[in-house]
Image (cartoon, rainbow, N blue to C red):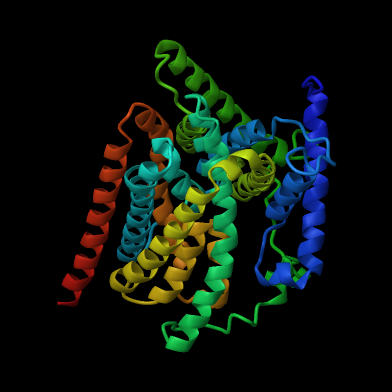
Amino acid sequence: MDAFTPWTIVVDLGIISALMLLGKLIRVKVKGIQRFLIPPAVIAGILGLILGPEVLGWLPLSGSLGTYAGILIAFVFAALPFTSTSKAREVAKVKRMWGYSQGGMLLQWGFGGLLGILILGKIWPLNDSFGITMPAGFCGGHGSAAALGDAFANFGQDEVLTLAMTSATVGIICSIILGLIYLRIGTKRGWSACLTEAENLPEELRTGLVQPENRKSIGEGMFSTISISTLTFNLSVIALVVLGGYLISKGVTRMAPSLELPVFSCSYIVGMLVKMVCDRTKVSERICPETSSSLSGAFTDYLVAFGIASIKISVVTQYLVPMIILFACGLLFTTCYVFFAAKHIFKEYWFEKAMFSWGWFTGTMAMGMALLRIADPESRSHCVDHYGIAYIFIAPVEIALITFAPIIFCSGYGLLFASVATVLGLAIMSYMIYNKRRSKA
């Protein structure tokens, strides 16, 4: 194997970029890919896995792809505090969206952990952490999968990255395939208040090509180009935040060697602090949320592609049967929660909100928005608005789960972690259902 140099990064980035463009071409031209709305980044990752060293060996990708994913997730979370433009309104509806989403997230983590420890772990010789690779990949997507895998690698469990990335890949594909099936069922049973036929996908949604009249700016020019590019300024802020997160993570490890705080979670905290300072000093007026969001989207695309391409086939083969059982049970559990809880928590547009939540509970928020676009083409449910505000309170819990799960599981308290997550999830869900029934009385 050739020695790793800075040019190795260039070669890896160039190959993945070429596959990304090929993935986009496939998305535009192949009807089957369009029907299931598979993102080009996922296509690029799958092609990288098949054509790379793990399978055919045709592409000279290095063995550092998983490391790239761990770095990119830090940039994604560092950008989060600078991307929000939501303002709180319709408090009751936001509260219901928060309870529904937060309860579901905790229950998915609890269910996966308990299934892995109490059932699958009794049949196969698995680490206690096996079960939580499902919710990390399903609810968290490739970003959380990369973060969890990177954290567990510090404790010597390198296989978690592959398991979580495989979970995220399976989840993102199932989110659309099963989502379209659920949309048809909802149409026939009259669950939706504004559903269009799932077969009639807009061309813009199928191909991903936005027509001129519908195109939106990805950012505003905050500076004169003679001084500094707006893109450079926003990227510099995000990179500075990541550096701060990295230094904090390494500082904590140096002071307490047994405590491993992931760089991504430290970056998010630093980002929140920097955002507070920028708000007080009015520097925020020069930080463009749309540009930060666009950068975050670019980081996420490459994270997904690198993450899938880094999957170790030998690990997948070793854990194939328990993985299939874990994913099947996870999809069944998520289906039951999404539709049962939505129907009993939301007062209106419950099916539309369930479809959005199904997309992000199993894939990504982009998948949820794609399904919502079909279920609610005129955005009458205001689901994304409510979710955007609710996520401000969901994100810290999600980060805490990913940050402390490796420490807790590797300390032998995985069963306690999963049990507490389950109890809290059930408590939130029960309270939200009770609150809806009480408001009707």
Residue 121's x, y, as percent? 38, 42
- Assign the C terminus to one quadrant of the image: bottom left
Q: With 125 as the anchor, is 297 left or right in this view?
A: right
Q: Tell me if I can see residue 301 in this picture.
A: yes
Quarter of the rendering containing residue 198: bottom right
In this view, the residue farthest toward the front is 123
x 75%, y 40%: residue = 224
Q: Tell me if I can see residue 311 in this picture.
A: no
Q: With 375 as the anchor, is 97 left or right in this view?
A: left
In this view, the residue farthest toward the top is 255
Residue 118's x, y, as percent? 32, 45
Up the image or down, 178 lies above or below 302; here it is below
Up the image or down, 319 lies above or below 245; here it is below
Up the image or down, 243 lies above or below 92; here it is above
Residue 89's x, y, as percent? 37, 62
**Foreground residue among 241 and 298:** 298
Q: With 21 as the anchor, is 389 left or right in this view?
A: left
**Foreground residue among 171 and 274:** 171
- Assign the N terminus to one quadrant of the image: top right
Residue 95's x, y, as percent? 31, 60
Q: What is the number of callouts on the image?
A: 0
x 34%, y 26%: residue = 411
Quarter of the rendering containing residue 14: top right
x 51%, y 51%: residue = 321
